[in-house]
Amino acid sequence: MSMANLIVQPDAAYIATDSGYFRKDGTIIGFYPKAMELADQSIAIASVGSLHLGYLARELQKWPDRKGWSQIEMLARLPGIVKDAYASSGLDNSERWSRFVIGFYSHKLQRALGMTFFTADSGGPSDKKPWVLYPAPVVLMPLLAMGEVYDGPVNLADPSFFDPHRDVMPMVEAQRRKCGGWGGIAEGCSAVAGEIVLTAVTRDGITHTVLHEYPDQVGQKAAA
């Protein structure tokens, strides 16, 4: 799968996603949302890689009591639920790895937070271990050098300097121009397509805002 950007500021955790789903040759299969909300726990989730959120949704349905879980319990269980989703789907979590980003609002701490975990060594930073939840104020997938996008230093965590609703699209445009390093999708193909949606998790709940829609078509490649 393609793009997922986590940006955490004190009052909101933001996740920016596209809606394109791709074959290995880079052609678009369809367009579907890529951010899942768990409203009862004030959590939003997105992923890149092979295990899309449809698999996770099916696995969560096996836990009818999950809406009664605390936020901490939901977060602690999430890697194990993803591991079960891999087993149910028949996918190999190493060969077909995924990386997840999680934005949430802690009413206890009165602030937004972010976390990430991945399913194989090749799916995350070399100094981190698979299947472990790590605090993460910023995760950009695919990774970008901010100098490719903005003039001068950028503090993504400072809302007075960076407004995701206003400022995230130049980052997305740069990611859409990337034609390599997508993991499993053919070189020379972009893997950002369809709607660009900004999901925000705040004290008041979870919202989804469509920032842009690219004119991509099923059966074609992104940015063709």
Image (cartoon, grey):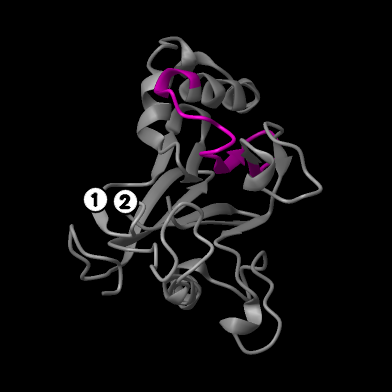
In the rendered structure, which amino acid carries the disc numbered 2? Arg
The residue shown at (53%, 71%) is 163
Q: Look at the numbered disc 2 and give the secondary structure of its residue.
A: loop
Q: What x and y, as percent, mark residue 11?
A: 60, 53
Instruction: Name which quarter of the figure residue 61 lies in.
Output: top left
From the viewer's perspective, tell me whether residue 194 is left or right of residue 35.
Answer: left
From the viewer's perspective, tell me whether residue 194 is left or right of residue 122.
Answer: left
Q: What x and y, as percent, mark residue 1?
A: 42, 50
The residue shown at (59%, 41%) is 105
The residue shown at (43%, 18%) is 88
Residue that mark 2 sits on: 23
Q: Look at the numbered disc 1 and give the secondary structure of its residue.
A: strand
Q: What x and y, as percent, mark residue 221?
A: 27, 66
The image shows residue 19, relative to residue 190, as above or below, that is above
Instruction: Name which quarter of the figure residue 50 lies in.
Output: top left
Instruction: Name which quarter of the figure residue 137 lies in.
Output: bottom right
The residue shown at (26%, 56%) is 28
Q: What x and y, as percent, mark residue 136?
A: 69, 49
In the image, which disc is placed on residue 29?
A: 1
